[in-house]
Amino acid sequence: MFDTLQDRLSEVFKNLRGKSRLSEADIDATAREIRLALLEADVNLGVVKEFIANLKSRALGAEIHKALNPSQQIIKLVNEELVAILGGESRPLQFAKRPPTVIMLAGLQGSGKTTLAGKLGLWLKGQGHSPLLVAADLQRPNAVNQLQVVGERAGVHVYAPEPGNGVGDPVQVARTSILHAMSKLYDVVIVDTAGRLGIDAELMRQASDIRSAVNPTEVLFVVDAMIGQDAVNTANAFAEGVGFDGVVLTKLDGDARGGAALSIAKVIGKPIMFASNGEGLKDFDAFHPDRMASRILGMGDVLTLIEQAEKTFDAEQTAKAAEKLLGGKGEFGLDDFLQQMQAVRRMGPLSKILGMMPGMGQMKDQINNIDEREIDRLEAIIKSMTPAERANPKILDGSRRTRIAKGSGTTVTDVNGLVNRFFDARKMMQQLGGQMGGMPGLPGGGRRQPQRAVAKPKRGKGVSGNPAKRAAGPAALPAAQQQPEWNPADAFGLGGSGKPSDAELAKALGDFQLPPDLQKMFNQKNQGPR
């Protein structure tokens, strides 16, 4: 959705790379280009004016970090201003102190409320809650049936006492759903209300009556991000007629200009809490302004990518595969490769995953042309192998590869390409693991044995700096520089030779006397056997 805006901003930043400093004229020209880019993306005019005014004020002020070049300076400021107009910080869902928490969905018809109810229910279920969907949209044909189908796909229960299609009282359904949830111990109730093709008094009255009946903890306004500036007008009307606590953006994966999505939070003053960017039930997550700003600027969204990987990958299985890959027990085979590839696929389309990586904005055409069916072909090739062949691809000779190609419906060239790429990738990862093998915490890397510190001999007074003379020993030194060999006895004042004379010993002992019993034992020993 933000591809056009991203491309325009990239061109603006590219024009600044050759400059050593920013003049006032450069800042004016850059601000003009950014203003055109935002207006072409259908961002609200008032929001654009405020954005540009803040950008120019900060760029001309003292907020520029001297360590950044002009392009980095502008990117930093634009990123911070984008985060500000998107709401500043993420707003988490509030839960009632006493269950059930009631969430009411409102919006125009066609905005995706019913599907979003299922997505929100699945998301809450993944957070450890027990949600209940309520079919309070009794006007739109088959709305109740649609919610039941969505709920079944999401694995979330649906409360639908009325058939809909114009039959039943939506206010009464919403009211009784709370009692049903309390009796069945559901801790979250999601009420799907009716929408209209436009703003009218009947829609506002019905939505207001449902709100009064259920006293929701959160009222979420669901808006289609593809409808342009009308989204802002609709949000204003709902804010005045019903009131809501947060916004949910749907259809962010569309190809329309997404400026309206950038405008709502700033114009309405309500945070964007969730975003839906696909048709799948899992294409839904909490909205983070900083991550969205990073995507718009082509810097990726690494945090969201990590979160999705943590949900998808099995930690124990991944650790075992990494240990094999980095030289631990066993050897990384095609079975391990297949498991990791399937886990990546569960995260979503490859084009979406790659789009979250930093720097991939410049490769959008290649990413969009990725053939998802290629993974199906790779999976078919691997599954056409025997367990022994998957564990040790080195045994794949010509006849085996021909058999695998026929069994998977591919060609021998496809099989050869997979095997060769697998060996190359495994070799590269093993080399990387070897370089980092001593680092603590890496799977299969082991730990470095603590090295004992070896004391280096210090060259003290009287020691020659010439290696030849030092090797010849103290005798090679002049007499004035020769020093007697140190002996531990010196510390006790027993003479430089280390072996005290009788007189020195008597002087050191003085009048010291042994205990009588011990002295008697020594006397008997000195006398010897009789």
Image (spheres, rainbow, N blue to C red):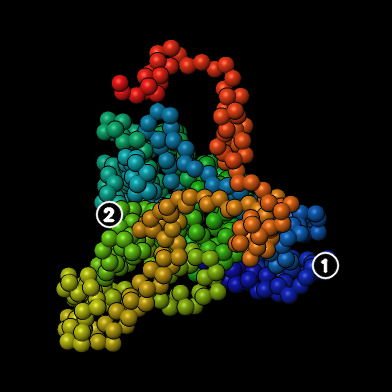
Identified by mark 1, the residue type is Ser
Q: State which tag comes first along the sequence, 2 or 1.
A: 1
x 28%, y 84%: residue: 416
Residue 249: image tag? none
Image coordinates for residue 253, horizontal then vertical, percent: 46, 64
Q: Residue furthest front?
A: 530
Direction from residue 406 to residue 220 in the image, left or right: right
Direction from residue 507 to residue 148 in the image, left or right: left
Let me know if residue 310 appears in the view. Answer: yes
Direction from residue 511 to residue 394 in the image, left or right: left
x 31%, y 61%: residue: 328
Mark 1, residues whose alpha carbon is within 10 Å: few (<14), some, or many (≥20)? few
Q: Where does label 1 land, which residue?
A: 23
- Front-most of residues 236 and 382: 382
x 55%, y 58%: residue: 292
Identified by mark 2, the residue type is Arg
Image coordinates for residue 62, horizontal then vertical, percent: 80, 54
Rendered view: 278 above or below 371: above
x 17%, y 80%: residue: 407
Q: Where does label 2 land, which residue?
A: 153
Rendered view: 337 above or below 77: below
Where residue 335 sits, quadrant-wise, is bottom left
- Front-most of residues 132 and 210: 132
- Front-most of residues 449 and 223: 449
Helix, strand or loop for disc 2: helix
Q: Quadrant of the C terminus?
A: top left
Image coordinates for residue 427, horizontal then vertical, percent: 37, 73
Mark 2, residues whose alpha carbon is within 10 Å: few (<14), some, or many (≥20)? few
